[in-house]
Image: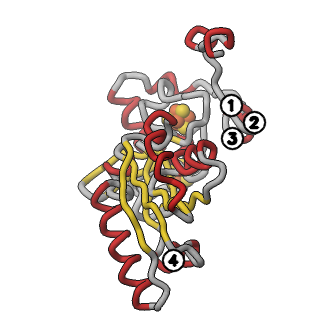
Amino acid sequence: MIVAEQKPLDEIKSMLKGCKKVLAVGCGTCVTVCFAGGKQEVGILSASLRMSTDLDGEAISIDETIVQRQCEEEYNAPLEADLEQYDAILSLGCGVGVQSLAQQFPGKRILPALNTKFMGYPSEQGVWEERCQGCGNCVLHLTGGICPVSRCPKSLFNGPCGGSQSGICEVDQETECAWHLICENQIRLGLFEEMMKIQPAKDWSSARDGGHRKIVREDVRIPDVEKA
Ligand code: SF4
Ligand code: SF4
């Protein structure tokens, strides 16, 4: 899932400076699951903003709503009917949700209430850990299902750096060494010999380093003639 967390209240208030009426919009998917932008968080943030701006003598009226997926236009479409009355939309979606709203409603200010962090895994209640950086060329079949891009701070591809102690990463004492885990998994799977093969330097052009990325699937595209 995409993992995000709420910005500090003061930062959100400074974004809302000058607004009189705002619509807070949550998202019912990833950010609901990580307790950052679901119905409950929209309610708590809106109440906090009402109280805080009232105490400051600059009260902002805040309405609340939630859409199932802010990153898809059809879910956001019902918002359009009432938008005129608002000075801005405060989005509690991830960065994709915020940009979807901005693209869909170009005449309206769309403000991000969250900081989008990473694609992650809920390792225990209240803890999310980064698991994938969307490098565009997955190597998990070579690394025992452990991602060296996101879980090794140095994104090493040919074994550990040599700095780990008792399975703990030298960069962060609270993080297991990704390569320690990779070796353990490959031994368990009887694939340790495979790891002796030197991997070529990774081609990072499939990652962010190659610029803005998009996927085009001609087989599922709607031809222009049908769209018209
Ligand atoms: S190797 Fe790349 S695609 Fe696979 S999990 Fe890691 S970052 Fe994600
Ligand atoms: S100790 Fe392990 S996880 Fe940490 S940087 Fe070195 S190889 Fe990567």
Check disc 4 and report the residue beneath it: 13
Mark closer to the chain start, 4 or 2? 4
Answer with mark 4 or mark 3, whichever residue precedes in sequence.
4
Q: Residue at x 55, y 62 (%)?
A: 88
**Amino acid, disc 2:** Gly
Which residue is the site of mark 1? 206
Query: Which is more toward the observer, 59 or 138?
Result: 59
Q: Which residue is mark 3?
A: 208
Q: Give the Cα distance between marks 3 and 2.
A: 5 Å
At horizontal 26% and vertical 53% (from top left) the residue drawn is 124
User: For the residues carrying marks 4 and 3, which lies nearer the camera in this image?
Assistant: 4
Amino acid at the residue labelled 1: Ser
Residue 10, image x, y percentages: 50, 80
Spot occupied by residue 150 in the image (x, y as percentages of width and height)? 52, 45
Disc 4 to disc 3: CB gap under 8 Å: no
**What amino acid is labelled 4 in the image?**
Lys
Residue under label 2: 210
Q: Crowding at label 3, few (<14), some or many (≥20) Cα neighbours within 10 Å?
A: few
Calculate the distance from the C-alpha at mark 1 to the C-alpha at mark 3: 7 Å
Q: Is residue 170 above or below residue 7?
A: above
Within 10 Å of disc 1 (Cα), the crowding (few <14, some 14-19, many 20+) is some
Q: Does the Cβ of the disc 3 residue fall within 8 Å of ligand 1? A: no
Alpha-carbon span between mark 1 and mark 4: 38 Å
Disc 1 + disc 2, Cβ < 8 Å:
yes
Residue type at tag 3: Arg
